[in-house]
Amino acid sequence: MPQVFHRSTNTIARVSIFGALIVVAAAGYGLDLVNRSSYVTGAGLALEQPVPFSHRHHAGELGIDCRYCHTGVETGAKAGIPPTQTCMNCHKQIWADSPTLEPVRASLRTDASIPWVKVHDLPDFVYFNHSIHVAKGVGCETCHGRIDRMNLTWQQNSLQMEWCLECHRNPERYVRPKEEVFTMGWQPPGGDQLALGRELLKANDVQPKTDCDTCHR
Amino acid sequence: MSQPTQTPQHPGVIPRPPFIEPGHTFETVTDQIGAIVLDQGVRRGWLIGFAIAFSLLMLLMVALTNLVATGIGIWGINIPVAWGFDIVNFVWWIGIGHAGTLISAILLLLRQQWRTSINRFAEAMTLFAVACAGIFPVAHLGRPWLAYWLFPYPNAMAMWPNFRSPLVWDVFAVSTYATVSFMFWFVGLIPDLATLRDRSPSRVGRFVYGMLAMGWRGSALHWHRYETAYLLLAGLSTPLVVSVHTIVSYDFAVSLIPGWHTTIFPPYFVAGAIYAGFAMVLTLAIPLRWYYDLEDFITMRHLDNMARVMLATGLVVAYGYMMEAFCAWYSASTYEEFMMTNRFFGPYNKLYWALIFCNVVAPQLMWFKKFRLSLGWLFLMSIIVSIGMWLERYIIIVVSLHRDFLPSSWGMYTGSIWDWATFLGTIGLFSSLLFLFIRFLPMISIFEMRTMVPEAKVEGEHGGGGH
């Protein structure tokens, strides 16, 4: 009876042992890359909005304070999207006829909200409150990045749990003095964030929880 | 060691019945076992059996699809009975899976030759039972697509599973058990796969069996390595026989629920597992040896031995029941005492007494040779024990949960139609896999049976290698 397999299959069989290990390892690594990529997290992708609102222009070049529009950020869970009236405070005078701003004027006429597309969409099973973070000295910039440099707004960070926990477990690396929360591009004086951070934790009684039910209520 | 098979060597000593009937040679053993796979083709009885099993398997598909599509609410579970059929069936199946490894590993290390005729299909049974068992914990997660969260892997949540929870140990225990059992089974198959490769009349057969035989040529070097590997695997499997069901019992014993929180659980669970496993081996062996004319290989002496193992482990289990009742009284804890009286006289008391009948009373017949050597009684007994072991898990899980510490949290539990569909479905999966196994792989180890025939003994006595 002739041999069923050619002699070369011996080599293939031996190689396949290691080949299988490599394939499994590569597949695991690949899945991990995909899971942390912006394809999954949406980080770094500027979304198209009904009006191409530029934080760079308003917050950066004009220097409008974050709280002028996001009024709830110090007192509520949500920072809040400003009502059309807030836009019109200025835009009834400036660029009042601009075709780009027609959706804003339409909103005022019809009393219907501008259908902004949510950029930071946390999962529904996560409880998040802006006011406590602001009150304990977490800068806007720490989570939202250099918003004063974004023409169109994108999500700076992954919003994955490891990202939340990084700060909740090591807050001294991220906190800043309360009066610097709304500053963009703040640097710790002297450059020693850790030393300052530890002081601030004591001074401001910062005690971030990592219990499950802190966020998953 | 070497059993005289035809003539007693010591006059005056009555030889015990042999493990293989007289008249067999190397050739007849290989022919008869190989023919089931190679020559007999699809037989009518096999086809009918497989059709029934496959229909039940399709029922499993329907039940699981509905579970994923609709949600866990299709099952009967709710607070306070949050574990129902799912965990009952999990423990039942995983228990059945224990006989295979016990037979293959521990009996191998103890040099019990009678394991040779039954180890192959007992190991297959183990694998298939573990496959069925694995379905339940995954299905009962509610969001089964996230089952991989049970494994510790670098993840975007920066979280590890809770290593202090026995439920996580369970994941490792069961997956290790499945892997090692599979390796053991497959390594044991290699020489037989080579035999099938060499004897297969079809090209496809030669190719597939050849692939699986992994280049086995039966050289002395191959045999040397094979025996080393097989012994190593047996050594690896041996602690698993004890560890897996011990850890399954921790799922209960580590909690504080009356009826679960007891130190006797690990040994009592392991004994119960072997009890259920041997019952299942008997349930399968009796029809198989009849349908495929394997009475020469799976002799009455094998069945007798298995019945004895069943009796012994059954007695350990009975001791466990006794100790549960004793400890409930001795603890002087209101909750423990209530748990026990609730078992005896509560709403599920009929099931409890049925359990005592199945697992404690009925198997006492195995003391008598007459019943051990009667195929009908043995088969009936094996079914009764299987039912009894299922009831045991039902009692432990449901009766302990349905009376919570506060009467305001009391409830009742019955399995829904989907619970039953899933359970029957796994029986379908189990039997479908078994039917395929019988059809495509030698259900008795050919090369090991060859060492049992008189020819091998003669060779061995003359100082030959034995193979």
Image (spheres, rainbow, N blue to C red):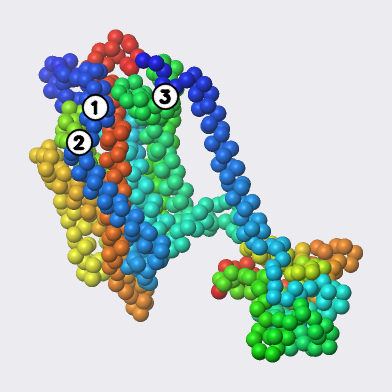
Which image quarter: residue B206? top left
Q: Secondary structure at mark 2?
A: loop
**Residue that appears at 70% across and 63% down:** A45
User: Looking at numbered disc 1 in the image, what kind of residue is underneath it?
Assistant: Asp
Residue with the mark numbered 1: B39
Asked if residue A128 lies left or right of residue B47, the reply is right
User: Looking at numbered disc 2 in the image, what kind of residue is underneath it?
Assistant: Arg
Q: Nearer the viewer, mark 3 or mark 2?
A: 2
Which chain is home to disc 3? B
Q: Which mark is residue B43?
A: 2
Residue B194 percent coordinates (x, y):
36, 23
Which image quarter: residue B111? top left
Which residue is nearer to you in this view: B175 or B203?
B203
Q: Secondary structure at mark 3?
A: helix
User: Looking at numbered disc 3 in the image, what kind of residue is underneath it?
Assistant: Tyr
Which image quarter: residue B66? bottom left
Residue sitting farthest toward the top: B462
Q: Which mark is residue A132?
A: none
Residue B63 to residue A211: above or below: above
Instruction: Determine the CA span between mark 3 and mark 2.
Output: 34 Å
Q: Do marks 3 and 2 share a chain?
A: yes
**Residue that appears at 50% across and 23% down:** A10
Q: Are marks 1 and 2 in contact (CB under 8 Å)?
A: no
In the rendered image, which quarter contains the C terminus of chain B? top left
Q: Residues within 10 Å of mark 2 (few under 14, many from 20)?
A: few
- Which label's residue is closer to the chain start, 3 or 1? 1
Residue with the mark numbered 3: B226
Residue B453 percent coordinates (x, y):
23, 20
Q: Nearer the viewer, mark 3 or mark 1?
A: 1
Which residue is nearer to you in this view: B50 or B386?
B50
Residue A196 to residue B243: above or below: below
- Which label's residue is closer to the chain start, 3 or 2? 2
